[in-house]
Amino acid sequence: MASLSSIAVGLVVGMIVLLFFDAAHAFSGMGKIIATGVSTLPKFAKVLYQAAPLIMTGLSVGFAFKTGLFNIGASGQYTLGAAFALICALVFKTPWYVSLLAAMIGGAIWGAIPGICNAFFNVNEVITSIMFNWIGLFTVNLMFSNMTGYLDVGNRTLPITAAYVIPKLGLNEAFNSSYMNISIFIAVVCAVIIWIVLTKTTFGYELRACGHNRNASVYAGINARRNIILSMLISGALAGIGGGIFYLNGTTQYTIEKLLLDMGFNGIPVALLATSHPLGTIFSALFISYIQVGGEAMQPVFVTEIIDIIVAVIIYLAAFALLMRGLIGRFIKADTGNVNAEAEPDAPATGKDNTAREGNGK
């Protein structure tokens, strides 16, 4: 209810923005946002293609939330994962699964460093992960800048040979789109695995216990430092896989830029909208991707900046899902309390009354 309320409010605000800028085309524009993602198979394929890395970055942020950490460095971990995957595919000509494993390792390394700083030096992971976003971006740019044989004139990586990309298994023909491959299924499997680890294993219980109360966990014999490092390492690995599956499709090329990649930051609202639930992350990522594909269809009637405003408002309001969840929970709890109070029978006023009744009965 909390997430759906946030989505509804976001769409209403988006409609107001459209009416303000171009009232004549506002309703048609909103119609494109709502309907474009399922209007054709190629559009739906793009929704799935963009949702796959969003699921992974959302899992990255949500996993850290579940263990009491705020991983705002998913963008840097995503970037390192993409770089490791591309270098393996372009330079070493490794199979796609080896490149994806390298992406996981790259993200894990970049995620473990803030975890080590937190565990051993008590440095807040938010500060270090933000710093490592930028360090990661410019490190990757520096690596690719010195790989001139693998870049085109526009400072973009060359396309990956078909033998080294994630398999499509005929899905590209079924959906009539070059974007479509098995990456969405990989992301869904990862979400299910994370859900099982967090809810069905002792390891996941220890991670969540440290997130709820680190001091109590230490008192109970749980190694908090180890769990902090492992939490950030796993969180970074998930983001790294997201970078790998996005760029190993054989269509998208990495571009040397001075701005952080949005996909990592979009994982934050995905996790918030799903209230950090691994399985809920699948649906929230699909929704964010769906809105983005619909926003692209609004051009040229509405300029890109207006589309970005609408998408940003919806994403921003997703952050209030937890707040709205608390408010709804309090309302339901209060309403249940009132019903129970009305249903309870009146208790005897004093013990004397009971004794008198018993005496009369005798």
Image: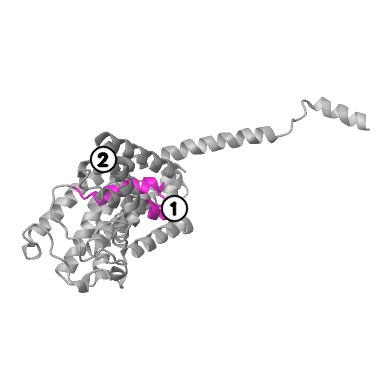
- Label 1 is placed on what type of residue? Glu
User: Which disc number belongs to residue 194?
Assistant: none
Identify residue type, mark 2.
Ile
Which residue is denoted by mark 1 in the rendering? 206
197 relative position to 330: left or right = left
Any part of residue 115 in sight: no
Q: Nearer the viewer, residue 93 or 43?
A: 43
* 272 drawn magenta: yes
Alpha carbon distance from label 2 to label 1: 40 Å
- Badge 1 marks a residue whose secondary structure is helix
**In which quadrant of the rendered view does residue 5 lie?**
top left
Residue drawn 83% across and 26% down?
353
Which structural element holds mark 2? helix
Q: Residue at x 22, y 51 (%)?
A: 76
Q: Quadrant of residue 320?
A: top left
- The single residue placed furthest to the front in the displayed view is 24
Q: Which residue is more in the foreground, 86 or 130?
A: 86
Q: Is residue 184 above or below residue 54?
A: below
Mark 2 vs mark 1, foreground winner is 2
User: Which disc is residue 309 wearing?
Assistant: 2
Q: Position of residue 334 (x, y in %)?
A: 56, 34
Q: Is residue 299 above or below residue 313?
A: below
Question: Magenta span has 196?
Answer: no
What is the x, y in percent for residue 233?
Answer: 31, 55
Residue 286, picture quadrant: bottom left
The residue sitting at 27% across, 34% down in the picture is 20
Vertical placement of residue 110 versus 171, above or below = above
Report crowding for label 1: few under 14, some 14 to 19, many 20 or more residues within 10 A (C-alpha): many
Q: Is residue 318 visible?
A: yes
Q: Which residues are magenta?
A: 260-284
Q: Quadrant of the C terminus?
A: top right
Whether pointer 2 and pointer 1 mark residues with C-beta atoms closer than 8 Å, the reply is no
